[in-house]
Image: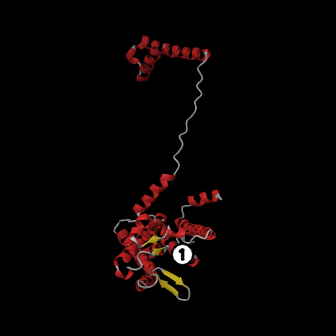
Amino acid sequence: MMLYWKSFLKQKNTLQILLYINVIAFLIVKFLGLILTLFKVDANLALSYLMLPSSLSALMYKPWTLVTYMFMHANFFHLFFNMLCLLWFGRIFLEYFSQRQLLGLYLLGGVGAGLTYIGAYNLFPYFSEQVNFSMLVGASGSLMAIVLAVAMYVPDYEINLFLIGRLKLKWVAGAMVLLSMFGITSTNAGGEFAHIGGAVIGALYILFLKRGKDIVRPFNRLIDAVVNLFKPKPKIKYQKHNYRPPSDADYNQQRANDMRELDEILDKVKKSGYTSLTEDEKRRLFDKSQKL
């Protein structure tokens, strides 16, 4: 199992990793809920520490929820349809962009969606009675960022919808945004505001990218920095050298070689003078004479 997981991570398939994280997080939270229920504790206690509150005072005590909420889901069908959309539109995104851009936009879109939700619930009086207990959960804000990004980049890309037929991506994305706008006063108002926030991030991403600015790059750098904190430091390898002092025979042999080389150079000096020596011979003459 460990070898499979290491091999999976080495493939660096961000889409698969995001799918795995969402599914595993859902299963862990559900398992914890089951354990809590057996002890007559609220089953949603674990999830409540991972969902994004609209209350600013509650957010101060749980700032991590601005990230964790986008990996949590309320029930199986919530998870299933979000992951189906992530798989579908994520594959289209990766036809034109990199794995790192997908991860960065998923996170940036989720953060933008969460901030839009918080801002709307604290700005509009319509939500004044709900702001203290409303919570946001789900990856749909991140998904809307991905959908709008590919729809703006390749608006005429055609997809095949069940019972509808082939539609251009720009019409699908436009319909999704309009449905969210019409639902901002519904029972899922928080989720609809998150969709709109994610869509805006996706659109801005393409607009900036066309001007040569990748706004998700800081998120990728932050991810790299966090990952590097948990990477084990490479161990320094010390090479052990077994030093063996030379024997008398080795020493005598080396000394004889040095004497012979020195004699050859001195003979040349005697015959042709010191100036006839090359630079290498002058150096060796000096070294051998000092050594002997």
* Residue under the image location 56 percent in, 86 percent down: 162
Q: Along the horizontal axis of the image, is 111 left or right of 80?
A: left
Q: Residue furthest front?
A: 40
- Can residue 97 be seen from the camera position used here? no
Judged from the image, the secondary structure of the residue bearing numbered disc 1 is loop
How dense is the environment of label 1, judged by Cα within 10 Å: few (below 14), some, or many (20 and up)?
Answer: some
Residue 149: x, y in percent? 42, 74
What is the three-letter code of the residue carrying label 1?
Ala
Does residue 47 lie above or below 221 as drawn? below
Q: Nearer the viewer, residue 151 or 132?
A: 132
User: How many discs appear?
Assistant: 1
Left-right relation of 124 to 31: left
Asked if one can make out residue 78 in the rendered structure from this viewpoint, the answer is: yes
Question: From this viewpoint, which residue is outermost toward the bottom?
Answer: 163
Quarter of the rendering containing residue 183: bottom left
Q: Which quadrant of the figure has residue 196?
A: bottom left
